[in-house]
């Protein structure tokens, strides 16, 4: 017996103390005659850890006792349907089954390949058997854990609540089985005494199944009363301490590359991840280890303008452009891999320091078939990019969807990810919105794409923040570039002014290249002479490029309201033509019976903004508190909720004011491409 009669523990605590760091658990006695492995990630905890891999192989071979190994893979947790997905349930399930088969095949290869074992996939949802390989296999899913008597059962990760819900009718079968049990992430949680630890990080959506009091729902209790908290890192120390109750004692926290091993005689050990950075543990780093930089566990790349050029949507000359059908672009001819990107990917393939790090792509392209074809065509260091990128999220939409999917599929926390993308922020930006999730996001500026300097700079900045305990959810600009975030106010220099076009450019610190500004954003007393100093407020246009939202004198004495006098604040709402015009001219009235939102304003004077485009829903519902300031050119920033204007503007007849009862007090006379006020 490979651990018989020996009690292992990475570190022991007092009997009454709850374990909150990897391996820090008191002696646990198993009641079932089985060997069990509990971990966060099979790739990191077994394939990436030779010691754990050898222990698992030895346990399975001893359980098989010379027979051909029988292996049952349970991917049910990964089949949970996401309510926020833009894919149909059928497509979601299809992708989940494809991913599950890939994971199952890696385990089969680990066991020696199809010639060394019989394998099948068991879905607890409907007791169906899929992807069966071998001979003498059961045809009824109900026989898998019983009559077939597998030597190894691996319950994989995904949504814990979905898994536990469909595990309800299988509890007795799991308890009676003597197979070596491997619980990965959700599979580890459900194997513990309590499953409500899945609520603590908020990763899994409990509403995918019927509402239950998850604090009262038991697990399989295969670990002698222990509960599990997978994907542990130092950032969760306080969370675990706050949420742990007496009933959770002992609690085993599983870091990304570690594995908690229990043998059938009650022996235990925690196999530590030798490559884990110090933040992965609640205690100090082990002597002689963790001297190097902190490395991300998942590196995610955008495709267009980051790894290759040109962007695929520009290839309009190719056949089947609209459908992105074959033959598609040719690697090296129509699309080229950028030199810096090739160098970075080659390092990831050849440098042993990157062993075990997961790689993914996240692209919003609407040419996904072409993108996947190019990933198969491009090679670095003898490997195709399709083989290199284990996780691929290529579809239109907000990239937060891509990263939510990556987190669930990989089990890697946002703080352990590093992301490279050419779109920084703004309407079409990606780095800023992904950074808000907690992902360190490196901006890849055009036209060079990913360069070796940016690659190294991003890695250094990620490592610095992790080792210093600083937040990782930031946008990292290139070396030597200070980040100028939207809303920042700074001094700048006028580089150009084109009065006939009513726009110009300034040079602003922290922004690469000249920054555009429109004349409507300039205060009344600003001298637009080339070389003069001004104060600007940085913003972004709809394409994500930097622009000046305001240009004022350096001394701050400018009046961007376009007049003198007191500033007043009034309620304002927005409405489309033609009804707004009828209201503004008194032909129609607004009555409070049409909407309770007007009741607090009855009898008051309010402002009306007349929109000239179709809004996705009635614009008057947008009651946010924003401020729109009049400029000296008498245009306006559109907004709803409140509007600021000076008393000098109030009598000009260009503010559409009216009583809620319907009596107009000023005509709506001024229009622009952005609307009328």
Image (cartoon, grey):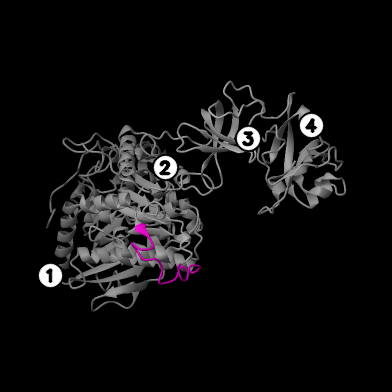
Q: Residue 402 magenta-drawn? A: no
How far apart are labels 4 and 1 at the CA level? 92 Å
Q: Residue 325 magenta-drawn? A: yes
Q: Earlier in the sequence, mark 3 or mark 2?
A: 2
Q: Between 437 and 332, which is closer to the camera in this rendering?
A: 332
Residue beneath disc 3: 521
The answer to whether 326 is drawn above or below residue 294 in the figure is below
Q: Earlier in the sequence, mark 1 or mark 3?
A: 1
Q: Is residue 591 visible?
A: no
The N terminus sits in image quarter: bottom left
Callout 1: SS = loop
Q: Between 639 and 660, which is closer to the camera in this rendering?
A: 639
Q: Earlier in the sequence, mark 4 or mark 1?
A: 1
Residue depicted at x 38% and y 64%:
372
Q: Is residue 54 visible?
A: yes
Which is in the foreground here, disc 2 or disc 1? 2
Which is in the foreground here, disc 1 or disc 3? 3
Q: Tags 2 and 1 in contact by the CB under 8 Å rule? A: no
Query: Within the image, what quadrant is residue 464 found in?
Result: top left
Residue beneath disc 4: 650
Q: Earlier in the sequence, mark 4 or mark 2?
A: 2
How far apart are labels 3 and 4 at the CA level? 20 Å
Boundaries of the magenta span: 318-336
Residue beneath disc 1: 66
The spot of residue 594 in percent (x, y) is 79, 49
Callout 4: SS = helix
């Amino acid at each position: 017996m490979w651990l018989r009669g020996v009690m292992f523990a990475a570190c022991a605590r007092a009997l009454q103390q709850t374990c909150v760091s990897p391996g820090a658990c008191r002696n646990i006695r198993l009641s079932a005659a089985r060997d069990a492995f509990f971990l966060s990630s099979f790739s990191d905890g077994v394939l990436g850890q030779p010691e754990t891999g050898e222990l698992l192989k030895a346990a399975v071979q001893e359980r098989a006792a010379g027979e051909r190994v029988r292996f049952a893979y349970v991917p049910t947790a990964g089949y949970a349907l996401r309510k926020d997905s833009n894919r149909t349930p059928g497509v979601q399930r299809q992708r989940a089954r494809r991913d599950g088969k890939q994971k199952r095949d890696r385990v089969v290869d680990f066991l020696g390949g199809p010639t060394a074992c019989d394998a099948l996939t068991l879905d607890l949802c409907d007791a169906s058997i899929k992807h069966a390989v071998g001979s003498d296999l059961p045809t009824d899913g109900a026989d898998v854990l019983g009559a077939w008597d597998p030597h190894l059962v691996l319950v994989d990760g995904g949504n814990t609540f979905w898994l536990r819900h469909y595990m309800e009718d299988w509890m007795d079968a799991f308890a009676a089985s003597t197979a070596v049990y491997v619980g990965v992430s959700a599979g580890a949680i459900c194997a513990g005494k309590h499953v409500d630890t899945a609520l603590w990080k908020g990763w899994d959506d409990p509403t995918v199944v019927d509402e239950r009091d998850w604090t009262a729902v038991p697990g399989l209790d295969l670990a002698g009363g222990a509960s599990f908290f997978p994907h542990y890192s130092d950032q969760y120390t306080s969370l675990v301490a706050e949420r742990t109750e007496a009933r959770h004692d002992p609690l085993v926290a599983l870091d990304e590359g570690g594995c908690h091993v229990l043998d059938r005689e009650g022996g235990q050990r925690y196999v530590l991840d030798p490559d884990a950075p110090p933040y992965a543990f609640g205690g100090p780093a082990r002597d002689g280890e963790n001297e190097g930089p902190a490395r991300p566990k998942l590196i995610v790349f955008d495709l267009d303008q980051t790894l290759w050029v040109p962007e695929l949507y520009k290839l309009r000359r190719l056949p089947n452009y609209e459908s992105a059908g074959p033959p598609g672009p040719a690697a090296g001819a129509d699309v080229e891999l950028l030199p810096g990107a090739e160098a970075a990917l080659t390092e990831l393939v050849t440098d042993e320091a990157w062993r075990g790090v997961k790689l993914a792509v996240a692209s919003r392209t609407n040419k996904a078939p072409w993108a996947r074809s190019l990933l198969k065509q491009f090679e670095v260091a003898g490997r195709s990019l399709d083989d290199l990128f284990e996780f691929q999220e290529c579809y239109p939409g907000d990239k937060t969807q891509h990263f939510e999917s990556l987190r669930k599929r990989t089990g890697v926390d946002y703080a352990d990810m590093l992301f490279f993308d050419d779109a920084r922020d703004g309407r079409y930006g990606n780095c800023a919105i992904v950074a808000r999730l907690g992902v360190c996001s490196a901006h890849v500026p055009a036209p060079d794409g990913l360069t070796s300097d940016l690659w190294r700079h991003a890695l250094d900045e990620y490592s610095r923040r992790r080792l210093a305990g600083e937040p990782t959810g930031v946008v990292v600009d290139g070396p030597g570039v200070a980040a100028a975030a939207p809303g920042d106010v700074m001094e700048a220099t006028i580089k150009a002014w084109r009065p006939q076009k009513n726009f110009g450019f300034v040079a602003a610190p922290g922004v690469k290249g000249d920054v555009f500004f429109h004349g409507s954003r300039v205060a009344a007393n600003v001298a637009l002479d080339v070389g003069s100093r001004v104060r600007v407020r940085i913003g972004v246009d709809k394409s994500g490029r930097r622009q000046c939202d305001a240009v004022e004198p350096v001394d701050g004495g400018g009046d961007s309201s376009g007049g003198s006098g007191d500033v007043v604040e009034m309620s304002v709402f927005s409405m489309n033509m033609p009804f707004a015009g009828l209201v503004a001219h008194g032909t129609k009235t607004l009555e409070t019976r049409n909407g309770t939102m007007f009741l607090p304003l009855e009898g008051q004077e309010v402002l009306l903004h007349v929109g000239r485009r179709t809004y996705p829903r009635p614009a008057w519902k947008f009651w946010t508190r924003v401020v729109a300031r009049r400029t000296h050119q008498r245009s306006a920033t559109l907004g709803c909720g409140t509007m600021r204007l000076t008393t000098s503007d109030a009598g000009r007849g260009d503010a559409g004011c009216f009583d809620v009862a319907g009596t107009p007090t000023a005509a709506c006379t001024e229009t622009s491409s952005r609307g009328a006020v």
